[in-house]
Amino acid sequence: MPVSSNYRPDPQFERLGDSFSDPVNAADFPMVKLRYRNQRAAQSVGLDTLSDDEWTAHFGRFEPLLDNMKRPRAMRYHGHQFRSYNPDLGDGRGFLFAQMRDETERLLDLGTKGSGQTPYSRAGDGRLTLKGGVREVLAAALLEARGVNTSKTFSLIETGEDLQRHDEPSPTRSAVMVRLNHSHIRFGTFQRHAYHKDQDALQTLLAHVREHYLPDATDSAALIRRVTANAARLCGQWMAAGFVHGVLNTDNMTVTGESFDYGPYRFASTFDPGFTAAYFDHSGLYAFARQPEAVFWNCRALASTLVSISDEESLIAALNTFEEAYREGLRDAVFARLGICASNDLEADIGFVRDTYSLLEKSQTPWEPFFYKWFGGAARDVKPEQHEADWAAAFHKFEPHRPERLEREYFLSGQPCDLLYDEIETIWAAIDEKDDWGAFEAKLDQIEICCQAYL
């Protein structure tokens, strides 16, 4: 296996033992055909030198990586799903495949989706549709371009099975996906051990998280404070990106505050507080404007798992930092998207953010063209529309903060990079009907140019 010199395997999670995961085998797929490999992500962990055949052997057949995990591990967790507690969860169609360090010494996971059945599959087949994989590749790429702390889709391999699904025309093609994450330890990982009243396991998990992810979290309250800040900041980034996650259950949030697992997501076309992503979210629990509420609720659920081994008042105090962390995270994310510097007055900055969203809501200006215009266009003396005049005057009072490469191809193209439902369907239709991956690849190229312009 020809790995580069910066490949540094470090399989920490399997050392925790069977209280936290189960050894499993990957499905034996009839076909492994590489459809997407993230070379930039692979380079960050020293796996960019793999040939395509070696890539499919590791990420389609799941042959172990050098000096890494001996067998895949299906992670154990519980979770609240739409506020109802479910003790029958766990990795039902995925597993943790490998862990390694990147150039900054972060411990990273390679986790799967669609890799076969596990003890937690229940009635599921453990598979992923190819359409679902395509959607996840696009979501993670665009979220990164819009400044969201997101997992990276590492690999997508078509696996040659016909799947039956109630929410898309069937039979439909199958795939296995690998994502690169800074930890797959979910809020629900803690919930499982609290549910079983296993204080030893909780203490072991706390020590593991402190050692490898949150080293400055010296006690349980400090850990909740850090996780709350991570979650609040992530939520602010979603709100600035116009992103609706769709399924903000506690098993879909990690302690490191990294967005992952994109099922029925949507990007907003205009500002709509009630915009939902999941067709089954009939009450709008996870609607766009309710995402901060949902994230805070999940933080409370996590904190409640530590009451038996911590001081309750200190946990409450840690949770009460959410609002300030969210306001700062939202301000930072919106200002980054507009290319302006924050002032020393958070209240004034948040007032400008509110005015920005009010302008978007009242005018129904398309979401992404608005940020494209003001970030890229301000340096070219864009003239505001009449309804933007007051907002623009306030905007120009902030110190600009834009990279020198502002005039790069993206802002000269006149085409802001969006990803709305109809475009995803068009991309998928070409793949499904003609096995034409041209539109998919072209979209990823456009997103990469967008990413280079903003970041």
Image (cartoon, helix red, strand yellow):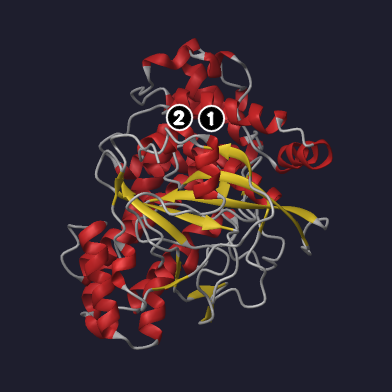
Residue 194 in the image: above or below residue 138: below
Q: Quadrant of the C terminus?
A: top left
Q: Are marks 2 and 1 in contact (CB under 8 Å)?
A: yes
On the image, the x and y values in percent for residue 279 come to: 72, 61
Q: Which mark is residue 338?
A: 2
Q: Which mark is residue 371?
A: 1
317 vs 428, nearest the viewer: 428
Question: Visible in this render: residue 326?
Answer: no
Residue 245 in the image: above or below residue 25: above
- Left or right, 404 with reference to 222: right
Q: Secondary structure at mark 1?
A: helix
- Left or right, 352 with reference to 140: left
Badge 1 crowding class, 10 Å Cα cut-off, few under 14, some 14 to 19, many 20 or more, is some
Q: Quadrant of the N terminus?
A: top left
Q: Which mark is residue 202?
A: none
* Residue that protrudes farthest toward the front in the picture: 1
Q: Secondary structure at mark 2?
A: helix
Q: Amino acid at mark 1?
A: Phe
Image quadrant assignment for residue 337: top left
Q: Amino acid at mark 2?
A: Leu
On the image, the x and y values in percent for residue 160 come to: 72, 51
